[in-house]
Image: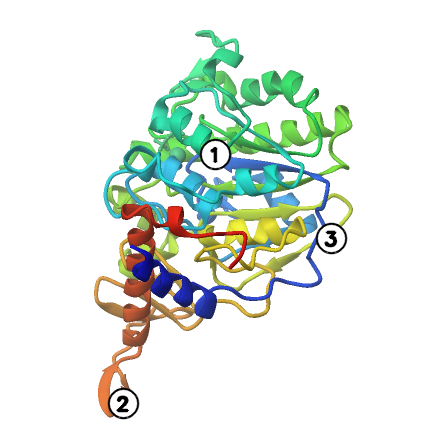
């Protein structure tokens, strides 16, 4: 009800409504935003090698002229890709169970496509799957995407498909005829498919030897990652060829993990590290790039997550979001919330990583045994954050389960 919303909006105003970066404010104004949401791309492959070769040569080079966030975490749960979309569009946490795209697709939201639509942008999603997968057709309409290019917009044959469907290189190539004619400025999200479990690839598309371990999944993964890296490279070239590159900014993000804990033995072998809860959390990092043609960029090490993307994009577009109700903070802002919450209650701070009741030193991975004294009581160094994280996840759930945004007046708060 209204009172609950008041408590939550007060929390948000106090804790997460911060001034965005002045330096970055409006630098993407009136430029197209091209968002590449890459299936199952995790950060551990970036700047890493297999059989002495770079796994992602294009993405590695792209770091040199991008803002690259090396400690950026996915925050998804059972809704997988749809959860990552939900985080980006709303800066709310996905549901603790099920997929919010299914369970709460009819709620009132104040989404990124809606806000930028009110600021002169056309918005669209490109994804070569059936439009009802993850209930996207219903959710996209509700959150006001103007257009979805789904499987019916593509020519899909046995030859140009593998695994889950249309191969990424074909996907990008066939998307050109639509993006070329798009009314500008636009915001377009491309969701890839080839690097999806079980990471199947036709032999003629493989340019990297498989890995050798007890996990067929991990063995295959490097090949499809490499394939997708090549597809992204081709896409950038197409954008230059059709003259859209200079007028656009590019965001590249991994949607969620691809290699689950089921493959810990093989992962441990590849990384040459002991697999524990600390490593598990560190493996939830996904790449996040902001590439602005003509700008140098920088590698940014501060902790960050998918919850922060919506406020970041709004700041880049020069849209004031101080009346918005969102849990993230601008990635480029100086004043940021000091934790990244994962959906299961694990979290990351600059100093600590917390998971399954253990508190780790973020830099060394050592368990922190010593306690701190708060209000005369001895407690784990992570404890104050355990409570903050629970509170925040809980507030987000209340907004979603109670459809509370329908009571909030975004215009005059
Ligand atoms: C399906 C694609 C994959 O359309 O987005 O979904 P996932 O299984 O990763 O959630
Ligand atoms: Mn996915």
Regarding mark 1 in the picture, which secondary structure is present there? helix
The answer to whether the beta carbon of the residue marked 3 is less than 8 Å from any atom of ligand 2 is no
Q: Where does the image place residue 264, in percent across and percent down from the top left? A: 27, 47
Q: CA distance from mark 1 to mark 2?
A: 50 Å
Of residue 130 and residue 234, the one placed in the foreground of this image is: 130
Q: Where does the image place residue 172, in percent across and percent down from the top left? A: 59, 23
The quadrant holding residue 60 is: top right
Q: CA distance from mark 2 to mark 3?
A: 47 Å
Q: Are marks 2 and 3 in contact (CB under 8 Å)?
A: no
Q: Which mark is residue 267?
A: none
Regarding mark 3 in the picture, which secondary structure is present there? loop
Residue matched to label 3:
296
Regarding mark 2 in the picture, which secondary structure is present there? loop
Q: Which mark is residue 225?
A: 1
Q: Residue at x 61, y 62 (%)?
A: 20
Mark 3 crowd level (few <14, some 14–19, many ≥20, 10 Å Cα): few
Residue 52 visible in the current orientation: no
The quadrant holding residue 114 is: top right
Screen quadrant of the N terminus:
bottom left
Q: Which mark is residue 375?
A: 2
């Amino acid at each position: 009800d209204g009172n609950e919303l008041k408590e939550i909006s007060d929390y948000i105003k106090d804790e997460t409504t911060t001034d965005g970066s002045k330096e970055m404010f409006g630098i993407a104004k009136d430029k197209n935003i091209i968002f590449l949401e890459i299936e199952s791309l995790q950060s551990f492959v970036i700047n890493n090698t297999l059989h002495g070769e770079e796994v992602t040569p294009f993405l590695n080079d792209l770091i040199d002229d991008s803002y690259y966030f090396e400690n950026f975490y996915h925050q998804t749960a059972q809704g997988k890709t749809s959860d990552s979309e939900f985080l980006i569009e709303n800066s709310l946490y996905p549901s603790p169970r099920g997929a919010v795209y299914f369970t709460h697709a009819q709620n009132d939201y104040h989404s990124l496509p809606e806000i930028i639509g009110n600021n002169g942008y056309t918005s669209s999603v490109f994804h070569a799957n059936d439009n009802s997968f993850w209930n996207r057709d219903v959710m996209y309409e509700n959150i006001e995407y103007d257009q979805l290019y789904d499987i019916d917009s593509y020519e899909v044959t046995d030859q140009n498909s593998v695994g889950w469907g249309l191969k990424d290189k074909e996907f990008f190539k066939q998307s050109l005829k639509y993006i070329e004619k798009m009314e500008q400025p636009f915001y377009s999200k491309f969701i890839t498919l080839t690097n999806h479990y079980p990471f199947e690839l036709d032999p003629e598309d493989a340019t990297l030897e498989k890995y050798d371990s007890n996990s067929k999944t991990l063995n295959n993964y490097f090949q499809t990652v490499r394939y997708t890296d090549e597809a992204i490279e081709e896409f950038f070239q197409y954008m230059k060829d059709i003259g859209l590159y200079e007028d656009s900014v590019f965001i590249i993000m991994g949607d969620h993990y691809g290699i689950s804990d089921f493959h810990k033995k093989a992962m441990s072998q590849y990384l040459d590290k002991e697999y524990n809860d600390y490593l598990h959390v560190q493996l939830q990092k996904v790449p996040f790039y902001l590439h602005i043609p003509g700008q140098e960029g920088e590698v940014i090490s501060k902790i960050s997550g998918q919850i922060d993307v919506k406020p970041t994009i709004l700041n880049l577009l020069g849209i004031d979001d101080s009346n918005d109700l969102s849990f993230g903070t601008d990635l480029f802002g100086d004043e940021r919330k000091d934790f990244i919450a994962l959906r299961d209650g694990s979290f990351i701070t600059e100093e600590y990583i917390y998971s399954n009741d253990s508190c780790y030193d973020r830099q060394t991975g050592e368990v922190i045994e010593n306690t701190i004294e708060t209000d005369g009581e001895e407690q784990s160094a992570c404890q104050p954050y355990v409570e903050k994280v629970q509170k925040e996840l809980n507030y987000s759930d209340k907004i979603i389960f109670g459809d509370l945004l329908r009571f909030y007046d975004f215009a005059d708060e």
